[in-house]
Amino acid sequence: MKILIAGGHIIDPSQGIDEVGDILIEGGKIREVRCHGKAGEKEVNEGRDLKEGRIPYSRLTAHGLEIIDSRGMFIMPGLLDMHTHLREPGFEYKETIKTGTKAAIQGGFTSVCCMANTYPINDSATVAGFILKKAAEEGSCSVYPIGAITKGQRGDELAELGMMFDAGCVAFSDDGSPVMGSLIMRRALEYSKIFDIPIISHCEDLTLSGGGLMNEGRLSILLGLRGIPAASEEIMVARDIILSELTKGRLHIAHVSTEGSLKLIRDAKDRGINITAETCPHYFSLPEGAVGDYNTDAKVNPPLRTERDVTAIKEGLREGVIDVIATDHAPHHRDEKLREFEVAPFGISGLETALPLSLKLVSEGVLTMPQLVERMALNPARILKIDKGTLKVGSDADIVILDTNREFKVEAEKFASMGKNTPFDGWILKGRAAVAIYKGKVNNL
Ligand code: DOR
């Protein structure tokens, strides 16, 4: 079956495409991209029917050709989330590869990279192989495992990086448990050069965060909750930048949350140090006040920060100092999040809200649409050397058709993810994926 996506506004920064056109899919691959010229407001909105409940695109099948009328929509590469927790093996009561990849598709992600803090930890070719096999059998999108940096994520001995690389790991990270020892981090960065894949650093000085529960400041004092100072992130960002300068290894800084971290990364990049960085939608959408009523769904690590940090993170995205928007999708069981703030686990279920929250950056004028696609698809693919994030002819037909006018209410209970833990429940957001095509398979959302 051939599929023609007709008349949408194609955004593909990998080829500099930002215009109305059609895409032909055959055999799960992109066969042809035809552009008709620059999209004007009128053209983009032509064919739109905004009446409640009406699907504004249509599908027609004739003579073995399915036509998806996407006038009024954006057509862009499927998104790639380089920071997802799929929880399987070991924590299937929180999420599985099956449910997590379904949630990804709902959110417009056709590829996810899963962190190593499973049980057992993904610190061997065996666990990486299990994840890939399970994903091939039950997954709705591509899954790329990220191997642990240290055995058991204990921070004292390097894991078998070479074997995990051979098994298909695309990066190494002890995310969730920062690598405290500088020598072992140095070695990891040296090794990363052999494989030319990044070390993803969860930057946190545990001795300084000292069991903290939220951002340290006036609010943490008022709430009587132990605080995590911005400095506990920034000290490790500074250390890892220095180690990356020393080793010339490939460093990617995970979930940047503070203005200070941003300044360090900007300065490092200005000095020509080869590092990359990501942030997550909650760090540019929500300040620390969200935990004000001891809402455990807003408890995340690093913690939500101040208004000033939120503004700085947006600025970092605008400038390109922050290369990537990743979700840090961290599903937890409802019973765990129902516990007291002190003992509830850190994490936000993020796959199904990331794109609409990021689209707010476009409406606020922080990012252009091509920049958004860069941060959510092309840049992560480039950083991880994954052949995705593009609409080039011959690529997998991983495509999102985006309706920027569709308003909807976030209803966590309806998430495909088993993790309903989101501080955005009940928010009215505008814009979401209407169709997610994965290797030519069409998912109407
Ligand atoms: O909030 C978080 N949750 N931050 C992390 O670094 C780990 C994650 C998890 O695994 O739940």
Image (cartoon, rainbow, N blue to C red):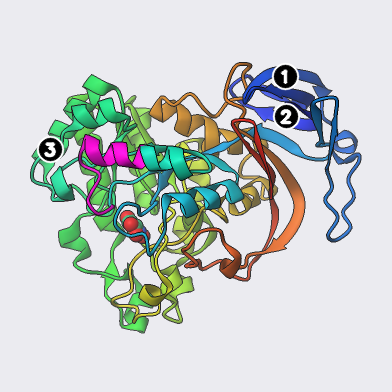
Between the residue at mark 2 and the residue at mark 1, the CA separation in whole angstroms equals 9 Å
Between the residue at mark 3 and the residue at mark 1, the CA separation in whole angstroms equals 45 Å
Residue at horizontal 79 percent and vertical 33 percent from the top = 8
User: Would you name the residue on which mark 1 appears?
Assistant: 33
Rendering coords of residue 77 (x, y %): 61, 32
Which one is earlier in the sequence, the residue at label 3 or at label 1? 1
Q: Which numbered marker is on residue 64?
A: none
Determine whether, in the image, residue 7 is placed left or right of residue 33: right
Q: Which numbered marker is on residue 158?
A: 3
Residue at horizontal 25 percent and vertical 54 percent from the top = 119
Query: Where is 399 relative to 353, above or below?
Result: above
Residue 361 magenta? no
Residue at horizontal 21 percent and vertical 69 percent from the top = 211
Magenta-tinted stretch: 118-132
User: Would you name the residue on which mark 2 appears?
Assistant: 10
Which one is earlier in the sequence, the residue at label 2 or at label 1? 2
Check whether the beta carbons of the residues at disc 2 and disc 1 lie within 8 A of each other: yes
Q: Would the CB of label 1 be found within 8 Å of ligand 1? A: no
Residue at horizontal 60 percent and vertical 51 percent from the top = 106
